[in-house]
Image (spheres, rainbow, N blue to C red):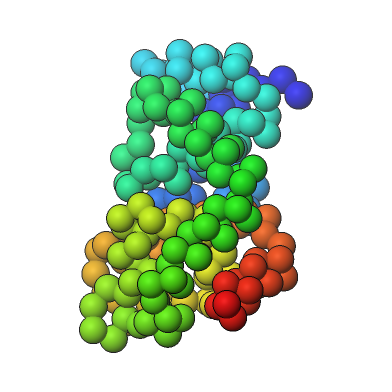
Amino acid sequence: MIVTPFDVYCEYLSKKKHFSDKKYDYIKYRGKTRASIESFHKRKDRYFFEKISRKFADQEIKDYFTSNFIAVDNPSSLWIGDVIRSGEKNYNEWKKRQESLSYNFKEESNELFENYKLPEVFDCSKSHPILLKRFMSGKLSSETMVIYDIIFDYIKKFDKKLLDPIWETVSLKISKYKPFLNIDVFRYKKILREILNE
């Protein structure tokens, strides 16, 4: 399917809105935005969208933007020029993580539960839980955080107890990323059971 620069622009806007606005749901609204062709033609940076449209196919563009919005701390300030600069690197790293999802999950979980017991990891009674600290220090990937939420449903609990900007940013990122990961829950539960029972 041929993708026009305007299609790329719409994808960029809808992913940006999805990852930065609590109320907008990319999946529910099928990536629809109120963007107009007129507003697109007024943009000085439309060359960037043309460049992407020539380089990637339809699904690749969707994944390209997902990978870039998940890579930044503040998706609402991600400009298309920044995406062009570091976009391919983010996309390639994301693809690698997708290809080795179960391996990464196993490695990250092994390291985590080698040092901590399960209840400790999710304990947020005193301060930031170990889970969040590990994620912030780069020891847990966004994908592993999503899988843990699918298994343990920890985000709702943290949302009630952690009322600070750091957690709010992470909570939004992980919640918004969740629909884009197709996870075989039983497989990951099995991996986790094996690690926890060792």
Q: Which residue corresponds to the image point at 43% horizontal and 67% vertical from the top-left?
A: 112
Horizontal arrangement in the rendering, residue 179 relative to residue 118 (left or right)? right
View extreme (right): residue:
1
Q: Is residue 127 above or below residue 165?
A: below
Give the total of numbered labels: 0
Please tell me whether residue 190 is drawn above or below residue 34 in the rendered image. Answer: below
Residue 89 position in % (x across, y down): 46, 28
74 left or right of 185 in image: left
Q: Position of residue 137 (x, y in %)?
A: 30, 55
Observer-nearest residue: 19 or 143? 143
> Residue placed at 32% from the left, 74% from the top?
129
Q: Quadrant of the C terminus?
A: bottom right
Q: Is residue 76 left or right of residue 163?
A: right
Q: Nearer the viewer, residue 71 or 15?
A: 71
Is residue 96 at least partly visible in the picture? yes
2 versus 12 height, above or below: above
Q: Quadrant of the N terminus?
A: top right
Closest to the observer: 86 or 130?
130
Front-lying residue, 58 or 184: 184
Residue 160 lies, in percent from the top left, at 36, 81
Q: Can residue 159 be seen at all in this image of the molecule?
A: no
